[in-house]
Image (cartoon, rainbow, N blue to C red):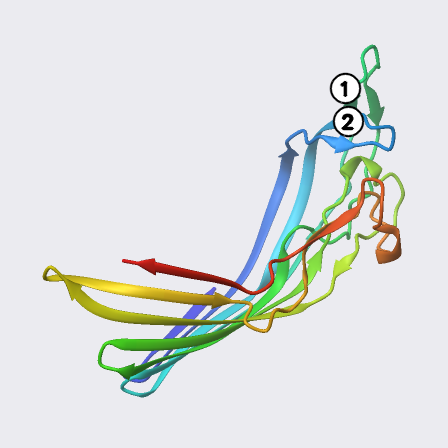
């Protein structure tokens, strides 16, 4: 369900969504064990519900200035339990094991931020020079977990701390041999924020203190970085 608005200086779109993913199959993924071996789970019958609202807009208060924004608020979770699941190991001679039921119902879908927002401003400060700045927000982000560990009800993976990133960019236009050319420069994460971009909570304990060592862990995002290109 969506609605759009257009005028000479302002545009906006609003979308509501509710999507059901039924009987999904999860491709076997190597899961490291404490003894150094790996196990693989063949899982089917996974049901998910994704719902939320998305809004984007652009405003031109002056000819050479554009203000852009976006907000996406989602609620994604597993809508039922799943199973049975067959778990095999790379240990020579080991036999596959069967887990009758995985208690996924009500757990949040991990590995992606369910709430995101963006606000940016672009300005043509000179006839051939455009400057821009933008802020990005990421929240409601749950760690990835090991499906085969969800053998009891009430588990939930760890929620990664929300974070903001600020970027700036510049575009200078000129001609080379009569061809339109742009020199593009970007500075990402200008404030050099330290943030967690991904996390793995194998047993869905929801406790950051238990994400150290072994097979658990987090991945930090990049600090301040730069790029320059010609187009």
Q: Quadrant of the C terminus?
A: bottom left
The answer to which image quadrant residue 89 occupies is top right
Q: Say above or below: 183 vs 203.
A: below
Q: Residue 68 location in percent, x, y?
A: 42, 76
- Count of numbered labels shown in the rendering: 2
Please tell me which residue is depicted at 23% across the width and 70% down the height of the picture: 173
- Closest to the observer, 7 or 28: 28
Q: Which residue is mark 1?
A: 90
SS at circle 1:
loop
155 left or right, relative to 14: right
Say if mark 1 contacts mark 2, CB within 8 Å: yes
Please tell me which residue is depicted at 47% across the width and 67% down the height of the picture: 187
Q: Is residue 73 visible?
A: no
Marked residue nearer the N-terminal end (1 or 2):
2
The answer to which image quadrant residue 216 occupies is top right
- Closest to the observer, 54 or 193: 193
Q: Is residue 111 visible?
A: yes
Q: Which residue is mark 2?
A: 38
The answer to which image quadrant residue 84 occupies is top right
Q: Residue 43 location in percent, x, y?
A: 71, 31
């Amino acid at each position: 369900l969506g609605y759009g608005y257009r005028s000479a200086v302002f545009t906006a779109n609003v979308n509501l969504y509710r999507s059901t993913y039924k009987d999904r199959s999860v491709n076997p993924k190597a899961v490291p064990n404490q003894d150094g071996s790996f196990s693989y789970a063949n899982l089917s019958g996974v049901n998910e519900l994704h719902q939320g609202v998305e809004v984007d807009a652009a405003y031109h208060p002056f000819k050479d200035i554009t203000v852009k924004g976006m907000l996406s608020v989602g609620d994604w979770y597993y809508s039922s339990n799943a199973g049975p699941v067959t778990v095999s190991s790379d240990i020579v001679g080991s036999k596959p094991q069967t887990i009758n039921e995985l208690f996924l119902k009500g757990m949040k879908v991990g590995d992606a931020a369910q709430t995101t927002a963006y606000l940016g401003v672009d300005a043509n400060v000179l006839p051939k020079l455009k400057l821009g700045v933008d802020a990005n927000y990421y929240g409601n982000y749950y760690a990835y977990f090991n499906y085969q560990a969800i053998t009891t009800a009430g588990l939930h993976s760890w929620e990664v701390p929300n974070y903001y990133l600020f970027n700036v960019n510049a575009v200078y236009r000129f001609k080379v041999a009569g061809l339109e050319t742009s020199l593009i420069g970007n500075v990402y994460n200008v404030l050099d924020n330290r943030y967690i971009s991904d996390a793995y909570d194998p047993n869905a304990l929801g406790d950051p203190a238990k994400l150290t060592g072994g097979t658990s862990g987090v991945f930090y995002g990049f600090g301040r970085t730069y790029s320059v290109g010609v187009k």
